Image: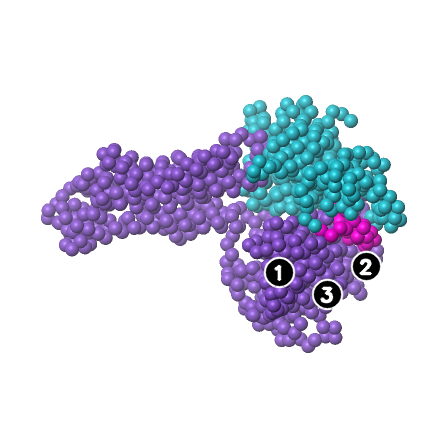
């Protein structure tokens, strides 16, 4: 490994953590690429333009009567028919739409002018300002809106403008609260802190950093509120509380049509449909925008449902020393069976003997977590095993039959995860959680189960198990919670414990304690352990055998001592050399240029070839197999022996020089 | 040593709790950072290390004590102290281009005098200085990996030419190979630009590698401070000893020694008790005696040259360091 200077990026097209990076699709673009979005938006624009240009589209005013065509259906002269006074319905709808849309605009305008500044300010400033604003909002929300509107209309002589503004003001209370929540969430983002440290003015923080974060919520709320405002406007005009009768209004037209229902039922259709469609269009637009926001935040929607599509290979006869768990040629893909199908891990082959401890180590994007989840039968939605088999004792687990896993989970295979707190149900005391578990596994009496629960807590070296059993999960520390999680895993006397980054969320001193505990428990119970970690030191502490993963493949597998003393794969060596080391050994650390390729961008040959300093044409010509490169070591490298067989030193010195 | 760039004097930070009580996150902490120096703050979660950083930049309230900058630095406080945050994913505004984010400090502090062209030029130059291409300015944070984003955050912190950069767990979220790149970058920038760092981390290995001085914190109080190499090679406080022994090692000899150390320092876990006038470590310390529960130890200089807050340092040293096995552990350089 050369002492590489920080590498210049490739024009920004790389990715981290296996996720496909790229410019986040803007919300507008997402809306415009969705069918529902385009349809609803197009409808609203069409209605708007038609109302504005009503004078050009239609001939004769909205009040032009013709007693020759009273209560007629659609015809060439009157596309939507006529009403009881022979007025053209289309013309009236378009002119009436002006009042409706102006009413909606007034309400939405009042809503935005009040709720956006107040909501964002409350969320950003917090404290007393926030309290005052939310309390006032609560108060306004408790006011019966319709009564206020009737009063306003009575006082201001049927002024629809005043009524709609009043409606906007009343509605702003709820929206203020929603925007405040969004702002509060944005407030806790580190980049807001960063802006404050830099010295950006408060006004700029609010308008340039917080507002863009809240705009999605604002758009959604506006669309939904517009639909409601239209409903209210129509309702009020239906009750003749708006402009006096000859003036066209959508609500007034519905009222007229209702009075003629038995004579001319058609008359209700045009006005009813336009109201319904406009309300629906606002609602759909709101939904589409909300989905678009969710999508930009999650970085792409999961496409396919969980599915399996392969037949497990025939059962292989057992070898002499029967491994507890064996994975052969395991592939896991996301969106399997679709055009988007991407392989996340491939050709994973490993086995765990009874009582053995196997470490899986790799950086983000290596696929170690997916591999662990596949072994434990916990693959996330959208991903599936597309090849290979997983056998636990005599049972085939990769068939996708959930019941097979259920038989082994807890008893045969137990799992400890990274975040102990999330593994414990917060609404029960620790003692109850454990007792219930023991009760269901051992099918023993309550008292017996309780005694065993306390014994399990003692087993994980909790000083005062009776006291801890009385506590709720939030009342114990993270380290203690991880001990409880380990105790729960032990309840079923598992033969295999899979621990996924069990100490990553813990302090270094607590980490050491948990690792010591796991080692001791393994000695006492004889269970096997698979430990997944990004930390070489953690794996070295506890595992007798280690496999190193890189870009979805196992690149090296060897007994721990051999692997760390004499790694045979360039990636393993580079990783060890990049570890921080003592100050006496001056000079920059060795680095690995570039980044882990995303699953889509895996090269044909060795996945590490693009970053390896020893790459030759042979490395990229064809897929590289994992093979024995020394009596103890398996590596996925065509040059292992040639490069490293002679070297005996720890790579730190050798490689950095 | 010249005038200290940053002096933290008897800093106390308290957060109010219900019913008029208060949680003391930082309790009487004093240290200083000289020009060109790198000081490390080490401790586990709840030790107050990040709160100290936040108090220095005004994101946390200073209840008592003082945070002072040198005269020159204080004149342009917001420009001279910058910060790099832990999470490179949330510390950059996703709706703004990289160029916008990186140039923001320059626009805020020197926008009038420099003009748009010059700001653009400096942004490009800064991006190249941290190993990115100038064209990165027009892209969005989502288009970069974690390591590259941390470079962007560093570029933003450095562009207004600060005297002090606070790195709050700036490496913790990064993969090992990327972490090495960023360490090298920080060292290189320190050498070319003469910046001082306040480096906050829970990783003793990284701190020992990067820092001149180190301050070890536990439950808001200083437990030990001194030269980084000496604190790492010859820790004196029982907590620091535990911290050093807890570092997972890939070297078998060192691993065995650390394990033996841990055995000696282990005490079954019990819930933490309220911290009154007792030693902050007494509930976890195997050496704790009556005096440790009754009075709070003051910081005092010990043989190693470090300042240690422990009543029984000498006795602890007699018990542990006379053991030949431990001696070898402390002295063995890494193979």
Residue to which mark 1 is pinned: A434
Same-chain check, marks 3 and 1: yes
Where disc 3 sits, the SS reads: helix
CA–CA distance in space, label 3 to label 1:
19 Å
The mark found on residue A645 in the picture is 2
The first of marks 3 and 1 along the sequence is 1
Specify start and end residues of the magenta stretch as a single range: B242-269
> How far across and how far down the image is residue A541, in percent?
76, 55
Q: Earlier in the sequence, mark 2 or mark 1?
A: 1
Task: Let me know if residue A127 appears in the view.
Answer: yes
Cα separation between marks 3 and 2? 38 Å
SS for callout 1: helix
**Visual hue assigned to chain A:** purple
Q: Are marks 3 and 2 on the same chain?
A: yes
The quarter of the picture where the N terminus of chain B appears is: top right
Give the left or right position of residue A90, taking residue A217 as reference: left
């Amino acid at each position: 490994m050369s002492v590489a200077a920080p590498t210049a990026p490739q024009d920004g097209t790389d990715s981290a953590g296996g996720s496909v990076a790229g410019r986040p699709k803007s919300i507008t673009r997402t809306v415009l690429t969705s069918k529902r979005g385009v349809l609803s938006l197009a409808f609203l624009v069409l209605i708007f333009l038609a109302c504005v240009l009503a004078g050009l589209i239609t001939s004769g005013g909205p009040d032009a009567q013709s007693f020759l065509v009273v209560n007629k259906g659609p015809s060439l002269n009157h596309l939507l028919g006529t009403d009881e006074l022979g007025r053209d319905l289309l013309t009236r709808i378009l002119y009436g739409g002006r009042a409706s849309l102006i009413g909606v605009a007034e309400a939405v305008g009042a809503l935005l002018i009040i709720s956006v500044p107040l909501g964002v300010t409350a969320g950003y400033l917090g404290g007393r300002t926030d309290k005052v604003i939310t309390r006032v909002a609560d108060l306004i929300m408790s006011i019966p809106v319709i009564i206020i509107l009737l009063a306003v209309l009575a006082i201001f002589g049927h002024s629809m403008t005043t009524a709609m503004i009043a409606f906007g003001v009343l509605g702003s209370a709820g929206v203020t609260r929603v925007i405040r929540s969004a702002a509060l969430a944005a407030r806790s983002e580190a980049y807001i802190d960063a802006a404050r440290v830099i010295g950006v003015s408060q006004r700029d923080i609010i308008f340039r950093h917080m507002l863009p974060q809240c705009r999605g919520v604002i758009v959604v709320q506006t669309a939904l509120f517009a639909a409601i405002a239209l409903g209210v406007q129509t309702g009020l005009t239906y009750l003749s509380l708006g402009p006096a009768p000859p003036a066209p209004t959508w609500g007034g037209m519905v009222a007229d049509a209702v009075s003629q229902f038995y004579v001319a039922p058609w008359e209700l259709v045009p006005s009813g449909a336009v109201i319904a469609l406009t309300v629906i269009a606002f609602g759909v637009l709101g939904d589409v925008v909300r989905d678009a926001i969710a999508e930009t935040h999650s970085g792409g929607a999961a496409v396919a449902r969980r599915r399996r599509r392969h037949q497990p290979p025939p059962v292989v006869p057992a070898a002499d020393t029967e491994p507890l768990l064996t994975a052969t040629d395991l592939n896991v893909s996301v969106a399997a069976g679709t055009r988007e199908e991407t392989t996340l891990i491939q050709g994973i082959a490993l086995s765990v003997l009874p009582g053995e401890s196997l470490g899986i180590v790799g950086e983000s994007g290596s696929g170690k977590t997916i591999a662990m989840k596949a072994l434990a039968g916990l693959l996330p939605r959208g991903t599936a095993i597309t090849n290979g088999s997983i056998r636990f004792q005599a049972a085939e687990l990769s068939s996708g039959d959930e019941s097979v896993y259920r038989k082994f989970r807890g008893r045969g295979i137990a799992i400890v995860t990274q975040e102990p707190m999330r593994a414990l149900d917060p609404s029960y005391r620790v003692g109850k959680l454990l007792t219930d578990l023991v009760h269901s596994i051992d099918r023993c009496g309550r008292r017996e189960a309780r005694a065993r629960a306390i014994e399990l807590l003692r087993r994980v070296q909790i000083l005062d198990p009776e006291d801890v059993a009385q506590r709720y999960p939030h009342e114990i520390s993270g380290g203690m919670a991880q001990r409880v999680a380990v105790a729960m895993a032990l309840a079923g006397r598992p033969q295999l414990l899979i621990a996924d980054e069990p100490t990553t969320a813990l302090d270094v001193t607590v980490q050491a304690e948990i690792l010591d505990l796991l080692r001791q428990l393994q000695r006492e119970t004889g269970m096997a352990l698979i430990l997944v970690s990004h930390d070489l030191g953690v794996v070295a502490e506890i595992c007798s055998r280690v496999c190193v993963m890189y870009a979805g493949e196992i690149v090296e597998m060897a007994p721990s001592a051999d692997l760390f003393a004499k790694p045979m794969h360039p990636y393993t060596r580079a990783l060890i050399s990049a570890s921080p080391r003592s100050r006496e050994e001056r000079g920059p650390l060795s680095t690995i240029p570039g980044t882990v390729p995303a699953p889509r961008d895996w090269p044909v040959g060795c996945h590490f070839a693009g970053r390896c300093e020893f790459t030759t044409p042979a490395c990229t010509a064809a897929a590289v197999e994992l093979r024995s490169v020394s009596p103890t070591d398996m590596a996925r490298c065509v040059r292992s022996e040639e490069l490293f067989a002679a070297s005996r030193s720890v790579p730190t010195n050798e490689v950095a020089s | 040593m010249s005038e200290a760039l940053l002096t933290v004097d008897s800093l106390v930070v308290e957060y109010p709790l219900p019913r008029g009580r208060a949680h003391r996150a930082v309790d009487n902490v004093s240290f200083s950072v000289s020009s060109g120096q790198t000081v490390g703050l080490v401790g586990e979660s709840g030790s107050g290390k990040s709160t100290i950083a936040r108090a220095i930049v005004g994101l946390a309230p200073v209840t008592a004590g003082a945070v002072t900058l040198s005269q020159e630095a204080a004149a342009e406080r917001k420009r001279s102290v910058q910060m790099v945050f832990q999470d490179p994913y949330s510390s950059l505004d996703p709706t703004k281009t990289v160029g916008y984010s990186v140039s923001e400090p320059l626009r805020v502090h020197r926008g009038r005098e420099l003009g748009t062209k010059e700001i653009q030029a400096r942004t490009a130059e800064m991006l190249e200085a941290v190993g990115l291409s100038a064209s990165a300015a027009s892209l969005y944070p989502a288009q970069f990996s974690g390591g590259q984003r941390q470079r962007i955050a560093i570029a933003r912190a450095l562009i207004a030419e600060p005297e002090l950069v606070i790195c709050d767990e700036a490496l913790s979220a990064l993969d090992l190979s990327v972490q090495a790149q960023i360490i090298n970058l920080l060292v290189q920038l320190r050498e070319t630009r003469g910046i001082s760092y306040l480096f906050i981390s829970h990783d003793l290995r990284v701190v020992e590698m990067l820092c001149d001085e180190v301050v070890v914190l536990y439950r808001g109080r200083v437990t030990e401070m001194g030269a980084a190499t000496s604190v790492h090679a010859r820790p004196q406080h029982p907590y620091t000893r535990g911290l050093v022994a807890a570092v997972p090692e890939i070297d078998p000899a060192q691993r065995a020694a650390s394990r033996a150390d841990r055995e000696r320092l282990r005490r079954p876990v019990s819930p933490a008790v309220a911290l009154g006038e007792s030693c902050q470590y007494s509930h976890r310390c195997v050496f704790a005696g009556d005096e440790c529960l009754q009075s709070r130890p003051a910081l005092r200089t010990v043989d190693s040259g470090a300042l240690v807050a422990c009543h029984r340092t000498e006795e602890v040293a007699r018990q542990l360091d006379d053991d030949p096995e431990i001696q070898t552990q402390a002295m063995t350089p890494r193979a």
